[in-house]
Image: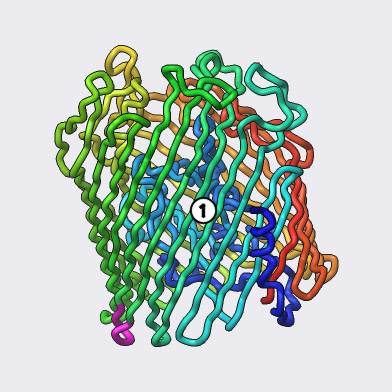
Amino acid sequence: MKLKFIAFLLFPLIGFSQQNNSTPTDSIKPSNVFMLGEVIVTNHQNKDTLNRVTSKTMVSQNKMDVSRALNMLPGITLTASGPRNESMVSVRGFDLRQVPVYMDGIPVYVPYDGYVDLARFTTFDLAAIDVSKGFSSVLYGPNSLGGAINLVSRKPSQKLEYDGSLGMINENGYKGNLNIGSNIGKFYFQGGFSYLDRNSTRMSSNFVPTANENGGQRDNSYRTDQKISFKIGWTPTEKSEYAIGYINQQGEKGNPVYTGSDPLNSLLLKPRYWQWPNWDKESFYFISNSNFDDKNSLKTRLYFDRFKNTLDSYDDATYTKQTKPYAFESIYNDYTYGGNLEYNTKFIPKNDLKIAFHFKEDVHRENNLGEPVRHFIDNTVLVGIEDIYKVTPKFTVIPGVSYNIRKNTEAEDYNSTTKVISDYPSAGASDAFNAQIGFFYQLNEAQKLGATVSQKTRFATIKDRYSYRMGTAIPNPDLKPEKAVNYELNYTAGLFNKVTFQTALFYSKLSDAILNVSNVQPGKSQMQNFGEAEYLGVEAQINYEILSNLSLNVNYTYIERNNITNPNIHFTDVPNTKVMGTLEYKPIKILRLIANSEFNSSRFSTSYGARVPDYTLLNFYASGKIAKNFSIDAGINNIFDKNYCLVEGYPEEGRNFFVTLRFFNN
């Protein structure tokens, strides 16, 4: 299997060679971004390094999955769900239920709980990742309470483009990928294949062994992720474009056991022995933009997304038997379909008006092995209007408003004692209004100032409303949307053509927040619209070209999250302070050296006060071109072998290294 995989990746190297004088990580140009997949509010958005990660940056620092790539941005914190071995991020304190994830503007988050394991989304075929924080376009659709994340794919610009890699990670992991594209005038094709496999991750040598983990290679930490994607496009005119795409992701992973010491954590005495034999996602989509004339156009997105997932719970650390009461095999078989229309008109002078309609149906099907399947269906509709009003050449106002409604059409309950399926009591439709406005002023050629305010909502997920949480919770089908009002002031300045400074002050006020309320009945909790909270902070970034071959990037985030309703219940997973610095040096044209350091202050892991300490990491990367079409990348992460956690009881990887051979023709 591995030999066939390597041969498949090496095949494109035979017979293709073009002159290339760029360094290897410069191979993805701005023209390779699939612009039809972007959701752009302002015309300078795609140059905003405060809110965009490019493929060049992802490749240069070996960020193989979306969560690690996003962590390079200010305002974003790498988080994890340790008990489920899921990698996620927080955007200005909002989690992924409140900041949905899109692929080329199409929603890809999981229907049941609104989360998505970003470690399953690799970056090998991406051109960029865009983040909207707080003030996000109504064109994204519903549930963008704290913003939105859009993964933007590639689009070829030449008759033949290819790039790929073969690499080793530590002594027991490997990766490989291949991207091929062709643009022949009115038609183009883009395809990609990637494979990432690790038998385990290595723990820090400073880790103290526990009853459930003896150190060295982290037990049950394996992962395998394979991805195939392709896109076929037609551009009959300069301003019209039509594309059909397909993505197939297949993943499996282990779930390392809790190794902490928190006496209040039930996993201390009753650890989970979990494995995920499949985490598979398949997406079909059609995106088009039809220009009727110079002032009117229609953009269409249609999609069908399928998600299949299996979780196996075992008796013990041998992962062979399922005989005890807590052992089970849980099966999800979900799908989502929908679409959106955006009508764009510039008929009114100085105005760029967009009218949007979204429809989405989420179908969740679940059962444990041997049990009947339960069905849940949600329909969500949005109607929105957004305008870009150029008051003067320097002053722009962007207002937007939308009406959102979600209706549950099916929800089934299961009684494990009688083995009978019944319908939950019907819940009324839930609706919400969103409104926002942004003011942007170009002070001069080098300085921009912005101010935004947005009122956003998030509907409760199927899990929020109907989950028993393994017998510890009471369903609440009548949950209302949670609300947030987000405020932001931002400023960008360029100095002496060498320094770019960007900063943003932000404040969010949450109401009707959906929180888990304990002891609604003895020993049982319930999700309720119970909370009020506020998030506030600042983010800043400096890019400094010290010399023509030496540059420095530093970003800083400070955030406070206050639980107004109950200050004794702590918000989890987000540190108050995060600082990241990157120094890049090119001593000669064919060699690039990068040193990267990251600091995170301590953070709460539980609402009752368990914490993980602060940590500082140092990483080093090097990339050298060894021939016209080849380069070698190598790097060391966590150089000082820091023993650290994002979640108490789930230590992160210790010192690790990689070596990668890259090939390319542009």
Q: Is residue 452 visible?
A: no
Give, as a single range, the part of the protein colored magenta.
Answer: 291-297
Q: Which residue type does callout 1 highlight?
A: Ala
Residue 512 at what x, y percent from top left? 29, 36
Instruction: Give the residue furthest to the right.
Output: 587
Q: Is residue 656 visible?
A: yes
Where is residue 420, by image quadrant?
top left
Q: Is residue 77 left or right of residue 520?
A: right
Count of all numbered marks drawn on residues in the image: 1
Q: How is the image coloured?
A: rainbow
Residue at 27% over, 41% down: 481
Above or below, comparing residue 626 to residue 82 in the picture:
below
Quick one: 92 or 418, which is closer to the camera?
418
Q: Is residue 160 left or right of residue 405?
A: right
Residue at 47% over, 27% down: 313
Residue 271 at what x, y percent from top left? 53, 20
Residue at 32% over, 45% down: 458
Dot 1 alpha-carbon crowd within 10 angstroms: few under 14, some 14 to 19, many 20 or more: many
Residue 426 at what x, y percent from top left? 14, 36
Check disc 1 and report the residue beneath it.
504
Quick one: 391 or 426, which is closer to the camera?
426
Quick one: 145 or 336, which is closer to the camera?
336
Residue 255 at what x, y percent from top left? 55, 32
Q: Is residue 42 left or right of residue 406?
A: right
- 293 in the magenta segment: yes
| SS for dot 1 | strand
- 105 in the magenta segment: no
Quadrant of the rendering where the C terminus is positioned = bottom right
Above or below, comparing residue 18 to residue 301 in the picture:
below
